[in-house]
Amino acid sequence: MTDLAITANDLRKSYGDKTVLDGIDLRIPAGTVFALLGPNGAGKTTTVRILSTLAAADGGRAQVAGHDITTAPDAVRAAIGVTGQFSAVDHLITGEENMLLMADLHHLPRHQGRRTAAELLERFDLTDAAKNPAATYSGGMKRRLDIAMTLVGDPRIIFLDEPTTGLDPRARHTMWQIIRTLVADGVTVLLTTQYLEEADQLADRIAVLHNGRIAAEGTPEELKRLVPGGHIRLRFTDPTTYQAAATTLRRSTRDDDTLTLHLPSDGSQRDLRTLLDHLDTSGIEADELSVHTPDLDDVFFALTADTDRSKENAR
């Protein structure tokens, strides 16, 4: 049986009369990336704060690294690292001093703290800038320093709350590679993000939070199969061939202006092979063929559609 790094059962949280978490369940295997997706206010950050013992739940139970978050919060804190939406970097001191401060907070002996700081600064390509004030760092450098500081205590479970918000595409891809390296080393990552591509690229499993509940959970591919709309697109340049294809492929939707046919498809290899065999048998050759399967954008919008409608109704 796979070891579970994080479990939660019926986790609930309200602020005043606003219910933020309305009974969520989580089972996150060790050594994986688990992504929480959801619109603003869906409860992503609240989930991270509760699981990292920074906030108390109103109900339910949870364990992190085998420790109950309510009865053994110190043991949970000793096993985790947290990188929040807002950087914990002190801009008035150098990158190296930030690292050494973190080592002191973890009560590392001085020689071990210096060694750990140097190793992490090198690992995150910050050695050359280590003596410079953190205020001079770029956004990507500050984020790398932030995660390096999180790793000083060698946590096996890391909470990353929207870690790439505000980063340019190059810095974002660098951060993705850092996360992949951490997981390859056996670290468990709970990631919150609003970047759908980020979840698709990194996550082993994804949960979509909506109105305080988990609307859907699964692998990226499993979630994509929840949404209809997959199709194969055939484009022709010869009108006669187009008409013949349209007659043969009766399930297709026609676009006579562009000589294009769309056929419903689940995007599977079997479905594509069946179509190609049918076209070959009929002596029909398309000039262009492309396969479209629903992506996480489609999943996200389908599962959270009533958020936008409720906002419109409130106006």
Image: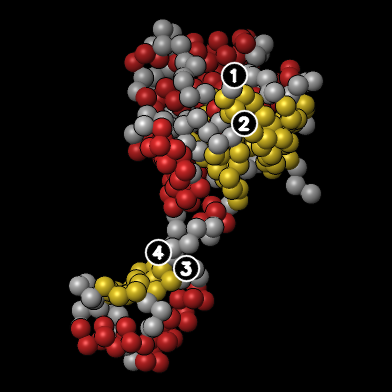
Crowd around label 4: few <14 · some 14–19 · many ≥20 (10 Å): some
2 or 1: mark nearer the eye: 1
Q: In the rendered image, which residue does mark 3 sit on?
A: 267
Q: Which residue is mark 4?
A: 292
User: Front-most of 260 and 30?
Assistant: 260
Q: Amino acid at mark 1?
A: Gly
Residue at disc 1, secondary structure: loop
Cα distance between the residues tagged 1 and 4: 45 Å
Residue 108 vertical placement versus 59 (above, below): above
**Chain-order first, disc 2 or disc 4:** 2
Q: From the viewer's perspective, is the residue at label 3 or at label 1 nearer?
A: 1
**Horizontal placement of 249 versus 191: left or right?**
left
Measured in 3D between alpha carbons, the distance from the residue under mark 2 to the one under mark 4, in whole angstroms, is: 35 Å
Question: Residue beneath label 1, please?
Answer: 16
- Identify which residue, 80 or 37, lies in the foreground: 37
Whole-angstrom CA distance, mark 4 to mark 3, is 7 Å
Q: Is residue 221 visible?
A: no
Which of the marked residues, 2 or 3, is nearer the chain's N terminus? 2
Q: Which residue is mark 2?
A: 21
The amino acid type, in three-letter code, at marker 4 is His
Q: Amino acid at mark 3?
A: Gly
Q: Of tags 2 and 4, which is closer to the observer? A: 2
